[in-house]
Amino acid sequence: MRLQARHRWLGVMTNNQAEYHALIEGLKAIKEWKPDRIEIYIDSKLVVEQIKGQYRTKEPDLQRLLAEAKGLLAGLDYEIKHVGREENRGADHLANMAIDARVPQKKKFGG
């Protein structure tokens, strides 16, 4: 069950950095709820496999984000799964809302 949906502008970054930030923000948001168990669905296979410890993390910024996410996951009963982008349209919609709210729209001229 999805309890909340959020979006906000994160600035210019890679897809994987944005996925990590979304995961971290979501984990911070549920911290006060103290859930018994959580299921996490992410459309970045890289992030999923790095969280699971199956892929190494070489890039320093991703190493920092991975450490922060793992710190927030510590002590939680969780399952993290990769889903295809087509199965994660809600997250795509929220990301586009954040981008659209931030990026000025071009004015249309003519008829």
Image (cartoon, grey):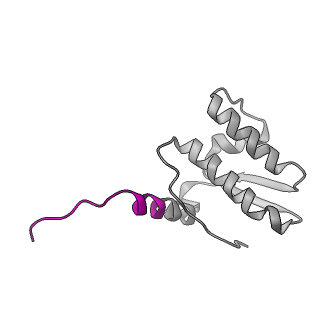
Q: Residue at x 48, y 48 (%)?
A: 11
Question: x and y percent of residue 13 in the render?
Answer: 50, 42
Tell whether position 45 is magenta: no
User: Which quadrant of the figure has residue 16?
Assistant: top right
- Front residue of this view, candidates 15 and 107: 107
Question: x and y percent of residue 68 in the render?
Answer: 74, 43
Tell whether position 101 is magenta: yes
Q: Which residues are magenta?
A: 96-111
- Front residue of this view, candidates 50 and 76: 76
Q: Measured along the vertical axis of the image, is residue 102 above or below residue 110?
A: above
Quadrant, the C terminus: bottom left
Question: x and y percent of residue 60 in the render?
Answer: 64, 28
User: Which quadrant of the figure has residue 104?
Assistant: bottom left
Q: Residue at x 53, y 60 (%)?
A: 8
- Left or right placement of residue 62 versus residue 99 in this view: right
Q: Measured along the vertical axis of the image, is residue 98 above or below residue 57?
A: below
- Left or right placement of residue 90 versus residue 70 in this view: left
